[in-house]
Image (tube, rainbow, N blue to C red):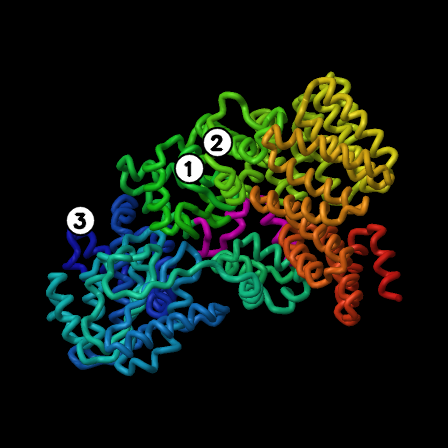
Amino acid sequence: MVHDLSGRGQDALAAAWAVLREWLQADLQGQEVFELLVNEPDRGVRALAARLERTGIPGFTAEVSGGMLGKLVQIASAEAVHVHQDRGHPPGHPSRPAELPPDIAAFTGRVSELEQLTEFVGTAEASSSTPIIVVDGPPGVGKSALTIHFAHMISDRYPDGQLYVNLQGSTPGLAPLNPIDVLGRFLRALGMDGKEIPVDTGEAATRFRSLASGRKMLIMLDNAASAVQARQLIPAGTGCAVLITSREVLATLDGVAHLHLSVLSAPEAVTLLGKFAGEKRVTADPEATSTLARQCGLLPLALRIAGARLAARPSWSLQALAGRLMDERARLNELQLGDLAVRASFEISYEALSAVYGPAEVSCARTFRLLGLLEGPDVSVDVVAALTGGTPGATDEALERLVDAQLLESPSPGRYQMHDLLRLFAREHAFRDDAQDDRRLALHRTFEFFLARARGASARLQPTDPRRTVQKADDEPWFATRTLALDWLEAERPNVVAAAQQAAAAPDQFGAIATQIADALFWFCHLRAYPRDLDMLGRLALSTAQRLGDREGEGQSLHNLCIANLRLRRFEEAVRHGTRGLEVRRAIGDRYGEGRTLDALGRIHYMMGRFDEAVEYGEKSLAIARQIEDRYSESAVLCNLVPAYQAMQRYPEAITCGQESLTIRTELGDRYGEGRMRMSLGVAYQASGRLDEAILCFEESLAVFRDIGDRYDEGRSLFQLAVAHGIGGRHTEAIEFCECSITVRRETADRYGEGESLHQLGHLLRNIGDEDAARIRLGQALVIFEELGVPNAEDVRTLLHM
C-alpha cells in the first residue's frame, strides 16, 4: 500500500510505516490496537489515531508525525484487513470472506425499518436485479448499527461471503478512503495476489466486477462520503446485495432503494438505555428515564453514551445524570465518554459543510449556526430569510443544502426541523463564530417578522377590533383572505408562541416585542380554542410589562388573562385578574380598556350565576362605549347582556339588546360578532317560547362560525341546536347535533363544553328509552365535571340515580 501513496515525504512515510508496523506487532498495547483494527475497525481507527497523536512516531519530529498521521492510519487499517484475510485464505486461492463486524449486542427496536429493508431485498431479488440499499440519516442516529444487524440477518442468503469496509466518510480526523484502496482490499479478499492488483481505479473496478460476477455475496459500504466514492465499489452481477450507509442521501446512485433513518421512538429509547445502564435501574425510576431519553433527543449515540456513563457509575441514579443534562449549555459536554462523543459526531458534518469557502458554503454554514438560536419546533423559508437577512431564493438553497447534509430534516415542502442536540451544537458555533450584535439582530429580525405577520393575520380575523396592537397603520396587509390568515397562524402558532417566550426571556432587548406578540395572538387563540396558550401568553406578557413599567401593556395583559381564565372555567382567578386590570386601566385613564374589562367581568359573573352583578357590570360598560362612541364595544356589551337579562327572565330587554347588537355588528361587517349575536339572540327567543325563531338563529350562527373558522363557537352552536330540537320533540335531529357538538368540542379541547354536550346527549337518549347508552354518556359527563370541579356534577349524579 505504501508505494501507491503519492505526495511529499514518501520516503519518510515508508520509513514511518516500517517503524509503526513493528510497534504494532511488538508492543502489547499495539497488538490490542491491531486486533481492534481487525475486529472493530471504527474503534481501532480511533484508538490508533489517538495513540499516534499522543506519542508521535519514534525517530520522527512532531511536525513530520502529525503531517502523516491520516495516511498512516489508513495504511494500518488496510493492513489489518489483509492480515485478517490471510489468516484463513492464502493469497492466490479463492476465498469466502466474512468481514462483517460483530452483530450489535445492544441493538434495539427498528422493527418497521428492518421489515422495509427485507422488503427492498425481496423486491430486487424477485425482479432479478441487485439489491442496492442506502440507509441515510443524521449523525448518531444508528445507521451502521441497523445495517450491520440487518446484514447478519440476511447473511445466510449470500453463501459466497461478505465484504465490509468503513469508507471513513464520518470518521473524526480521517479523510474518506480512496476507492482504489478499497478495491485493493476487496480484490485481496477475493483471492487475488497483491502483486496483480491494478493501480488504476477503473481497471481495479473492472477486476472486482469480474470476480464478483456469478457469486452470491453481501457487500457493506459503511459511512460513504459521497456517491462518487461508492459508485466504483458496486458489483454488476445479480447475485450480490449491497448495503450502504451515509450521512448523504446519495440520490445520484442508479437503481438504489433509500431508507431514511430517524431517531428512536420513546419506548425504544428507554429500552436502549436499559441495555447499557441496566434494566432494573431504568424500570425503578420511569420518570427520570423518560426525562433522560428526551434530553438525549432519542438519538441512539447519545443514549448509548448516557447508558454507558451510568453503567460505569453504579452508585449514580438516573435522576442524577438527568440533573447534569438539565443545563443545555453543558449537555454536549456531558454526552461524551471515551472515544464516543455526540459533539465530535456532529462536528464532522459541520466541517464538511464549511470545508469549501465559497459564498454559498459560507451562507449555508451561517444559516445553520443562526438556526440554533431559535426555540420553535420548525421553520419556514420566510422565517429563516428574516433570521439571516437573506433573500427567499438564497435561503431556500441554503436550507436544502443543510437537508442534504443531514443537519436539518424537511418533514414537508418548505418546512424544516432541527434535532434538539444539533440545535445546541449549532448554538455553540453561533456564539463562537458570530458576533453578539449579529446574533441579536438576527433574533430581532425574526421576532419582528412574527409580530408583523401575527398582527396582519389578526387584523384579517377581526378587522373591526380596535385593540391597540392588532395592526399598526403602516403594517403591510400580509394576508389576502381570512383563510390564508388562519392557515398561517395554525402552522406557525407553536413557533410564534416560542418566539414570544424567547423574547420575554431577554426583556431588556426584546421585552416590548414579547408583549406585542402575545397580544397579537389573542384573537386566534380565542377563536381556535387555545385557552392554555391565552393563559400562558397573558402571564408572560404581564410579567414582562411589569418589568418594563408598561402600564398600558399591564392592563391589556390582565384583561387577556381574565378572558383566558374565563375560557378555562377558573372564575375566581378570572375575577381577580379582571379586577386588577380594571384598577390599572382606570389609573392610566384608559376609558376604552376600562369598558372592555367591565364587560369581561360581567360575562364572568354571569357564568358564576351572579346575574345582578353581571347586569351591573354590563350596563356600566355599555355607558362607556356609548360615551366614547365605540360602536364595536357597544355591540359586544349588548350581546353579553342578552343572557344576563334572560337569566333574570327579563325577556323583552334581552331580545331588544340582541336585535340592537345584531344591527351594529352587521353595519360594521363583524362576522364573528354577528355569529355570537345570532346565537345569543336564539337563546333569548328559545327562553321566551319562540322556538322556530331560535332554531333559525342557531342555524345562522353555525353557518357564520363555520365560514370564519371559529371552531369553539361552532361547538356551542351545535349544542344549542341539539337543545332546541330536543325541546321541540325532534329527538333524532337533536341527537345528531349533540354528537357533532361532542366531536367539535373534543377537537378544540373544550372540556366543559364536551361535558355539557355529553350531559345533554345522556338526557336525550334517556328520553327515547335507550337507558344503557344514556348512562354511559352521563358517566362520561360526570368524570369531566368532577375533574373540573363545577356544580354540573351534582345534576348528573341526580340523573344517574334516577
Q: Which disc number belongs to residue 382?
A: 1
Q: Which mark is residue 505?
A: none
Where residue 287 sits: x, y (%)?
A: 66, 58
Q: Identify the secondary structure beneath mark 3.
A: loop
Asked if 657 appears above or below 585 in the picture, the reply is below
Question: Viewed as shown, does residue 722 lie left or right of 121?
Answer: right
Q: Position of residue 69 (x, y in %)?
A: 28, 52
Magenta residues, as a range? 317-343
Name which residue type carries label 3: Gly
Q: Earlier in the sequence, mark 2 or mark 1?
A: 1
Q: Is residue 464 left or right of 95 when viewed as pictured?
A: right
First of labels 3, 1 by sequence position? 3
Where is residue 314 shown, x and y percent of the image?
62, 62
Amino acid at circle 2: Phe
Is the Cβ of the residue at disc 2 closer than 8 Å to that at disc 1?
yes
Question: Can you tell which mark lies on residue 449?
Answer: 2
x, y percent for residue 752: 74, 51
According to the picture, the residue beneath numbered tag 3 turns out to be 9
Please say if 573 is above or below 70.
above
Q: Nearer the viewer, residue 454 or 246?
A: 454
Q: Name the magenta segment's main secondary structure.
A: helix
